[in-house]
């Protein structure tokens, strides 16, 4: 660890962290090892986690569309969320309650510039009502982009998460929204 001197005398001296990968290199045969490391980073000491590998090119959430006085999802987004939801169902008999953390490694086939945030939004929305009751339960997210032209996929890890933001109330019935007049 290298120590960097502070710019001012009253500032604390902070260690410099060198960039390294949390995830082992290699093909999809290393996904289980990656998932174990990712679960440990998201929620140290928690042994209860699920791993789902979603085959295919990871989908990025598109901007919402507006028309006819309402906001709606594009048909491509809706189809992709439904497909991802069906791939999550076998791993989740019922949605998990309480605070959750998710980690995703998105293996893309090209170096196309894409926001990790939009890839995470897709996974969060696709898991609503399947892996979790509502994506508001997700109090920690971690997304990584990797290149794998031969086997594009999404490696998803879901685990319990401890946070001062208690999200155990999202399973309760919410009052219906009032429509604007």
Image (cartoon, helix red, strand yellow):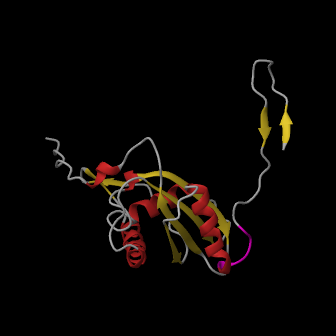
Q: Nearer the viewer, residue 90 or 149?
A: 90
Q: Which residues are magenta?
A: 24-28
Residue 181 vertical position relative to residue 168 in the rendered view, above or below: above
91 displayed left or right of 116: left
18 displayed left or right of 28: right
97 displayed left or right of 40: left
The verdict on residue 26 being magenta is: yes
42 displayed left or right of 91: right
Q: Give residue 126's position: percent from left, percent from top.
A: 39, 66
Name the residue at 43% across, 60% down. 124
Q: Give residue 155's position: percent from left, percent from top.
A: 56, 70
Name the residue at 63% across, 74% down. 31
Q: Give residue 48's position: percent from left, percent from top.
A: 48, 65
- Find residue 76 and report its image quarter: bottom left
Q: Nearer the viewer, residue 140 or 66?
A: 140
Q: Give the quadrant of the C terminus.
A: top left
Q: Give the quadrant of the N terminus.
A: top right
Residue at the left extreme?
A: 181
Q: Nearer the viewer, residue 76 or 177?
A: 177
Name the residue at 55% across, 55% down. 43
Name the residue at 67% across, 66% down. 146
Q: Give residue 26's position: percent from left, percent from top.
A: 73, 75
Q: Is residue 115 visible?
A: no
Residue 40 vertical position relative to residue 29 in the rendered view, above or below: above
Q: Is residue 122 visible?
A: yes
């Amino acid at each position: 660890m290298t120590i960097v001197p502070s710019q001012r005398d009253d500032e604390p001296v902070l260690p410099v962290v060198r960039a390294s990968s949390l995830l082992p290199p290699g093909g999809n045969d290393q996904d289980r090892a990656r998932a174990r490391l990712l679960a440990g980073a998201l929620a140290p000491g928690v042994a209860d986690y699920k791993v789902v590998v979603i085959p295919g090119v990871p989908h990025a959430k598109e901007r919402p569309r507006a028309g006819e006085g309402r906001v709606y999802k594009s048909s491509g987004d809706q189809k992709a969320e439904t497909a991802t939801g069906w791939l999550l169902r076998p791993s989740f008999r019922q949605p998990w309650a309480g605070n959750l953390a998710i980690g995703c490694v998105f293996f893309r086939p090209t170096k196309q510039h894409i926001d990790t945030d939009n890839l995470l939004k897709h996974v969060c929305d696709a898991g609503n009502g399947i892996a979790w009751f509502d994506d508001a339960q997700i109090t920690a997210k971690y997304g990584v982009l990797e290149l794998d032209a031969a086997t594009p996929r999404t490696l998803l890890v879901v685990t319990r998460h401890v946070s001062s933001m208690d999200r155990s109330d999202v399973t309760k019935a919410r009052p219906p929204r009032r429509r604007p007049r």
